[in-house]
Image: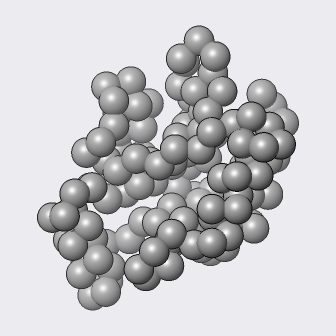
Amino acid sequence: MRLIGVYNANGGLAGELGYFFGHLIGTRSCTLCDITHSPFAKKSQWKLLEQSLKRELGIEFVLVHKNERTPAQLAASDGREPCVLIEDSEGKLSMILDWTDLKLAHGDVAQFERAVRAKLLMY
């Protein structure tokens, strides 16, 4: 089982710069980006959460940009970014957190972790 966080932003230099400047002037937002990153780097609390999920539950958490999704990830999340998908042992994808769930975390890794762990109880 693994978790896949889908950003509401494109990867690559052009995508990163476009998001950065759009975020600064208020034309772009990604609540998952706010949870995982400070303005310039991945949050240390986020790195600890990734390690904790792997160590305690054996769950890998990967992050992908909109333009980096596989066809299956695209089918499960297109138009609903940012979100978090869960991939079961058979490769089936389901959305476990949508943009409203992510917004409720207010950029806080601890609040996000509580939401993720609550959803994981169903799996």
Residue 18 picture location, percent across and down: 20, 71
> As drawn, is 48 to the left or to the right of 76?
right
Query: Quick check: 107 above or below 63?
Result: below
Nearer to me, 21 or 43: 43
Res. 31 visible in picture: no
> For the point 35% across and 50% down, which residue is it?
65
Nearer to me, 67 or 50: 50
The quadrant of the image that shows the N terminus is top right
Residue 75 picture location, percent across and down: 37, 28
> For the point 63% across and 72% down, which residue is it?
44
> For the point 63% across and 62% down, which residue is it?
47
Residue 114 picture location, percent across and down: 79, 57
Res. 118 visible in picture: yes
The quadrant of the image that shows the C terminus is top right
The outermost residue toward the top is 90
Query: Quick check: 8 above or below 107?
Result: above
The outermost residue toward the left is 14
